[in-house]
Image (tube, rainbow, N blue to C red):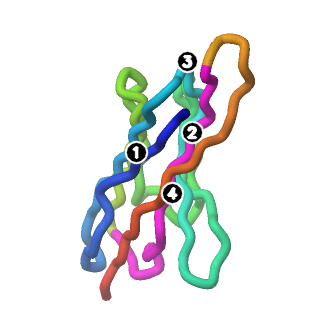
Amino acid sequence: QVQLVESGGGLVQAGGSVRLSCAASGTIFSINAMGWYRQAPGRQRELVATTTSGGRINYAESVKGRFTISRDNARNTVYLQMSSLKPDDTAVYYCNAEVRKDVSTPLYLYWGQGTQVTVSS
């Protein structure tokens, strides 16, 4: 089994910064893409940022220039540094990872349980 555990959420004032972490553990042969998504109350889950094992990065337009995604492949961990936070960034943030459990199995997408980020005005 594969588990993704997020940490680092909380309450922060507008203009502040927060760093989220997501560590994957369990039966892992390799990880392709890792990413962050968020879901605000009453809204659909949306992409925040993704990064591939080759280093290709993609950001939602709403977070470009404010958020930075990075990963530590040796630790199977992805990070999201969030700066210049706005109340509109308030949401539950979820990480995901495309995991291959051994050399002969296909990629499977796993999700973390989510971590709340609340930005006060």
Per the model, the C-alpha gap separating discs 2 and 4 is 10 Å
Q: Nearer the viewer, residue 11 or 23?
A: 23
Badge 2 vs badge 1, beta-carbon distance below 8 Å: yes
Question: Where on the picture, by quarter, is residue 1?
Answer: top right
Determine if residue 78 is in view: yes
- The residue indicated by pointer 4 is 94
Q: Position of residue 28 (x, y in %)?
A: 52, 23
Numbered circle sitting on residue 22: 1
Q: Earlier in the sequence, mark 4 or mark 1?
A: 1
Q: Is residue 86 magenta?
A: yes
Q: What amino acid is labelled 1 in the image? A: Cys
Numbered circle sitting on residue 74: none
Mark 3 surroundings: few (<14), some (14-19) or many (≥20) residues within 10 A: few
Badge 2 vs badge 4, beta-carbon distance below 8 Å: no
In the displayed orientation, state which residue is furthest to the bottom.
Answer: 121
- The residue indicated by pointer 2 is 97
Establish if 49 lies above or below 91.
Answer: above
Which portion, as a residue range, is magenta?
85-101
Q: Is residue 54 magenta?
A: no
Residue at x 56%, y 20% (from the top left corner): 30
SS for dot 1? strand
Residue at x 61%, y 22% (from the top left corner): 101
The mark closer to the camera, 1 or 3, is 3
Residue 121 relative to residue 94: left or right? left
